[in-house]
Image: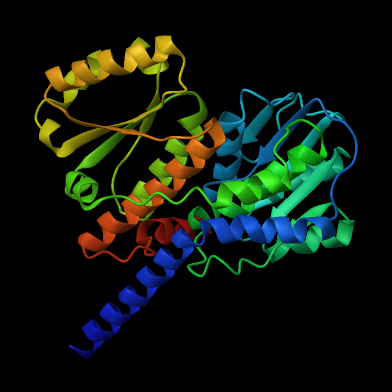
Amino acid sequence: MKSSKVAKNSKTKNNQLVADSIRALPQQMLQVVADWPKVNKPQGSYKEIIVCGMGGSTLSADIIRYGLADMLTIPIRIVNDYQLPSFAKQLSLVIVSSYSGTTEEALACYAEAQRKKLPLFVITTGGKLAAQAVRDNTPRYIFEPRFNPSRQPRLGLGYGVAALLLLLADLRVSSITASKIIRLTKEIKKTASKKEVDLVRGRSIIIVASEHLIGVAHAMSNQMNETAKIFAPYFTLPELNHHLLEGLASLAQPKKQWLVIFLSSGAYDNRTSKRYQLTEKIFQKQKFATYEKSFLGDRLLQALRCLYWSASLTYEVAVAEGLDTTSIPWVNYFKQQLH
């Protein structure tokens, strides 16, 4: 009985820290704005940006590359692996992002970029990556995550989002300035309703998104899996229409256990918006429950509002199910077996 009480108290404390991290998304971004003038940043012009990292450490880049797709003047590519692509050259800026600074794939990419003498920038809170960046005098942003008390990388995305936005502005490949970021932080809070929480509980989720919301759908999938322990793959329109619809039939028995969440937007191309209506209808005809969620504002604001909302939703579902939102036993088991 005593150990059960301790476990319950620990779970309550952990969940409160997660809630605090979610609410602090605007403060995370504001901290970066305050830190940025003192950051050692890369100089020069580049033809592309390659962001290396895993899990929550590259979700920010995914959010930015889709959220700013209509204004970026060079591409952002993401590497979730041990090696840099062969096309990485001197005009490629390699950003190595590892929240903990200990991720082996990110460290491998850093070492390769160093060997090839490629331009580098590091985003981390510490660990081996920070030590190497300091030793090599690599341009870097090493930050103290004061507004992520849960210490979960997936809940510290405000740091990566703001750092990338400011870096892109410095490199003159985006027009999002520090003042714009400050304005955004006042408008992004969007919490989930009890109705939405009840709709998700007890189900696995399929997330559907397009254009500027694709990166947020990726983040939502990550948080659904790790925070709420819900299997939640994401798919994109129009690509989904070209391969997924027939395969739904294989879910004949457990369809009542699935909810399809459509992240819609008035900013989508009209042809894509038309596909949303028809695709949702086909899911319904195959007996899937569906839910449509939309957001107001410009494309980047919509993405950030969706990020805040999805983090809120996954947290509230987890708490309603009595879960510890920080517990990741299978991930920990995998890491132990790997080494």
Instruction: Indicate the quadrant containing the N terminus: top left, top right, bottom left or bottom right.
Output: bottom left
Left or right: 104 in relation to 283: right
Extreme bottom residue here?
A: 2
Residue under the point 27% across and 16% down = 277
Left or right: 244 in relation to 125: left
The total of numbered circles placed on residues is 0
Give the percent coordinates (x, y) of residue 240. 36, 18
Residue under the point 32% across and 40% down = 232
Residue 164 appears in the figure: no
Instruction: State the colouring used for the structure image.
Output: rainbow
Residue situated in front as seen by the camera: 295 or 132 = 295
**Is 222 above or below relative to 26?**
above
Q: Quadrant of residue 272?
A: top left
Residue situated in front as seen by the camera: 178 or 166 = 178
Residue situated in front as seen by the camera: 295 or 246 = 295
Q: Quadrant of residue 337?
A: bottom left
Give the percent coordinates (x, y) of residue 96. 71, 46
Left or right: 136 in relation to 217: right
Left or right: 33 in relation to 285: right
**Is 156 above or below relative to 120?**
below
Residue under the point 79% across and 54% down = 140
Residue situated in front as seen by the camera: 183 or 72 = 183
Give the percent coordinates (x, y) of residue 59. 54, 43
